[in-house]
Amino acid sequence: MFARHIAANALTLIGVLSFAGVAVVAWGKKQYEAPGPLAQAICLRVEGGADMKDVADTLEAQRAVSTRAIFAAGAQYSGRAHLLKAGSFLVPAGASMQDINEIVTGSGRSTCGTEINYRIGILRAKVEVNELDPETSRYVEVVSFNPAEDDVPAAYTEMRDDPSVRYRITMAQGITSWQIVEALNNADFLSGEIAEVPAEGTLAPLGEDVRVGMDRNELIAQMVADQERVLAEAWEARAEGLPYANAQEALIMASIIEKETGVGSERPMVASVFVNRLNQGIRLQTDPTVIYGITQGKGSLGRGIRQSELRRETPWNTYVIDGLPPTPIANPGKAAIEAALNPDDTDFIFFVADGTGGHAFARTLQEHNANVAKWREIEAQRAEEAAAAGN
């Protein structure tokens, strides 16, 4: 009887403990998934070789978690603890411990801290060192320089080899292949040597993160593959009745469109003008092709086009030759390629700058001459204002 009483009490105790254990687990799970105490976003730095306990300590010190033990236990229980990545990660205000666990075990791509952005533009390239402000989620420039011309700042040298730094290359659309190769060769965080300049138009302008030490030829191959894919998809979805014998001619047209306007919404309209001119047997008469015939894509002209150059015959001078030039004059982006293959349906055959950064379009020479006269007035007024400001 006594033994049965002891056994009954033991079973009761086990039941109570089991119930309590389930309750504790349920409470811990609720805490793990609930919004956290973080009042403002932070940039969480995870050092190489750190483990979840180290991360838990840092989070507790920054008051991003209520209980470090629950964070560490939750990470282990989720099976993601071994996926911890080194880097700098943006943790938003109110992030739960579960959210933070997924942030630090995800792609490993740094989302805050320092970003080194290599911007390759039409006229120049520059390296920007930026720091993310966690409170505003905006990058603030620390320093910038032209790697081809300027001394390398100490601020760049000090953080260049930091494994948590995020590297990005951003290229302007309409940049030439020569300019791309020159700029990539000046990027000291890349490796390898580009043996020759790729054919004009074959490179899709980059705008993405890159790895430190990435081979330059790997980047070039990626850009070629991307451009081939974009062109193939646009060619497949092209409008009917276009004056192109093949996709290469569409790429040539896209490069001209890219160089003629920096206003994205205008690309299909500009494309319609050039398509109409081709269909009517009118020469394209576009200045960027003349410039390419002079520079061969090796940098900018740096001055206005001379009348003698407008009359000089080169394979790219569309004031002299009929139809399209033999090659693209730059590397167009996706939007310009799509515009070349799906232009607006208009009867415009002229356009000229309108003083706003865009263009005025015309159907007749009389309309066009009136638009040109307005543009000349704007140019003269700006020249007067510049002269007055100089005095």
Image: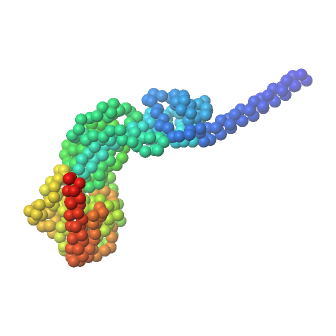
Give 387 or 167, whichever is nearer the viewer.
387
Which colour assignment does the render follow?
A: rainbow
Image location of residue 68, percent across then percent down: 59, 30
Give 287 or 337, whichever is nearer the viewer.
287
Q: Is residue 33 above or below residue 3?
A: below
Give 41 or 356, whichever is nearer the viewer.
356
Which of the 4 image quadrants contains residue 20? top right
Q: Is residue 364 above or below residue 336?
A: below
Query: 185 left or right of 294?
Result: right
Question: What residue is at 36 percent from the left and 46 percent from the top?
Answer: 208
Query: 264 left or right of 183?
Result: right
Image location of residue 127, percent across then percent down: 30, 41
Residue most toward the right? 1
Question: What residue is at 20 percent from the left and 56 percent from the top?
Answer: 387
Residue most toward the top? 2
Which of the 4 image quadrants contains residue 333? bottom left
Image location of residue 297, percent across then percent down: 18, 53
Q: Is residue 268 visible?
A: yes
Query: 180 left or right of 344?
Result: left
Mark count: 0
Q: Is residue 109 above or below residue 313?
A: above
Q: Is residue 341 visible?
A: no
Image location of residue 371, percent across then percent down: 24, 71
Question: What residue is at 21 percent from the left and 77 percent from the top?
Answer: 366
Q: Which quadrant of the rendered structure holds the N terminus?
A: top right
Q: Is residue 142 above or below residue 50?
A: below
Which of the 4 image quadrants contains residue 16? top right
Question: What residue is at 56 percent from the left and 33 percent from the top?
Answer: 63
